């Protein structure tokens, strides 16, 4: 995913509403393209909380936590006594 110019705000400071909208749209596009919240926070130097809040404000529909569904390996049994 190409790097974009992301609006920044000092930690513990509010972002300008226009900057929040721009940042949220960019984060949303990257998230929908498959990036995790943690990856986005690292890439754009935001906290995970700020990244998540910007995504929520942008109208994100979060994926389930923990990656994709796990499949059972052949030959293994999951039955317990």
Image (cartoon, rainbow, N blue to C red):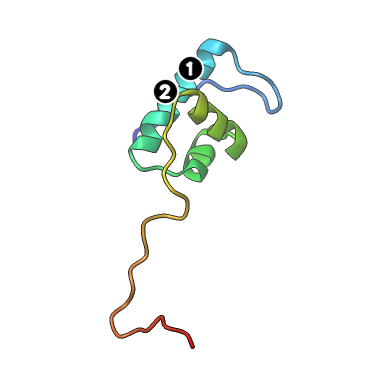
Residue 5 seen in the current view: no
Q: Please say if 69 is above or below 40.
A: below
* Residue 36 pos. (x, y %): 45, 44
How dense is the environment of label 2, judged by Cα within 10 Å: few (below 14), some, or many (20 and up)? some
Q: Identify the element where label 1 is drawn.
A: helix
Query: Residue 49 at what x, y percent from top left?
Result: 61, 36
Please state the horizontal and vertical placement of residue 63, each as a whole percent of the image.
41, 44
Image marks 2 and 1: residues in contact by CB distance under 8 Å: yes
Q: Residue furthest right?
A: 12
Which residue is tagged 2? 25
Query: Which is more toward the observer, 80 or 11?
Result: 80
Residue 28: name its quadrant.
top left
The residue under label 1 is 21
Tell me which corner region of the image, top left, top right, bottom left or bottom right, holds residue 35. Answer: top left
Q: Is residue 35 visible?
A: yes
Q: Name the residue located 35 percent from the left edge and 84 percent from the top edge.
A: 76
Q: Residue 1: which numbered mark, if any? A: none
Closer-to-camera residue (40/81): 81
Question: Which residue shows up at 59% across the image and 31% down it?
Answer: 50
Residue at 58% in and 39% down: 48
Determine whether, in the image, residue 70 is placed left or right of residue 47.
Answer: left
């Amino acid at each position: 995913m190409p790097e974009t110019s992301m609006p920044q705000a000092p930690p513990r400071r509010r972002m300008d509403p226009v900057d929040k909208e721009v940042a949220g749209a960019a984060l949303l596009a990257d998230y929908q393209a498959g990036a995790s919240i943690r990856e986005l926070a690292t890439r754009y130097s935001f906290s995970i909380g700020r990244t998540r809040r910007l995504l929520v404000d942008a109208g994100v529909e979060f994926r389930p936590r923990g990656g994709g569904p796990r499949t059972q390996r052949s030959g293994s049994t999951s039955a317990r006594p």
